Amino acid sequence: MPSEESHWHAALEEALGEEAERLGLPEEVEFRWNMIPPMDDWIVNVAGVAGEGDLAVMVTARQLALTAELVRLLDDSAGSTLIRILALPVEKFVPQTLSELLDATGIEVLRFSDN
């Protein structure tokens, strides 16, 4: 866990566990959390516990604006071998154009409760 854990981190980890199979991840993973200051948003590297190394990169967008630039940043920084995940609170609206861009880039969307 990160040194300054937010109240919603456990819910995000639980949501990822519930969606692991759909996302192509093993059931047991480890997280490396890197804060995106000054927001309460994070870049999370997801690694396998059986020595698989990094399997996915996840960006949370609780406070970050959902923009095409954010999607491109996630797509470009993850490379072609990692699963790319955009983690959003369940109530956050995704505009149609951004949804289409997520589909086109193959970025997975993971919804979680941040209450």
Image (cartoon, helix red, strand yellow):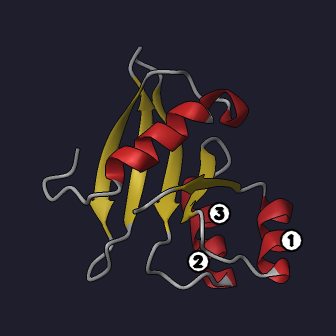
Q: Secondary structure at mark 1?
A: helix
At which x and y percent is residue 82? 60, 43
| Mark number, residue 75 | 3
Q: Of residues 51 and 28, which is closer to you in this image? A: 28
**Residue under label 2:** 70
| Residue at horizontal 77 percent and vertical 82 percent from the top | 95
At which x and y percent is residue 25? 59, 29
| Residue type highlighted by circle 3 | Asp
Q: CA distance from mark 1 to mark 3?
A: 14 Å
Quadrant hosting residue 105: bottom right
Report crowding for label 3: few under 14, some 14 to 19, many 20 or more residues within 10 A (C-alpha).
Answer: many
Q: Secondary structure at mark 3?
A: helix
Residue farthest along the front direction in this orientation = 115
Report crowding for label 2: few under 14, some 14 to 19, many 20 or more residues within 10 A (C-alpha).
Answer: some
Can you see residue 72? yes
Quadrant hosting residue 30: top left
**Does 94 sit left or right of 101 as displayed?**
left
**Does 17 sit left or right of 30 as displayed?**
right
Q: Of tags 1 and 3, which is closer to the observer?
A: 1
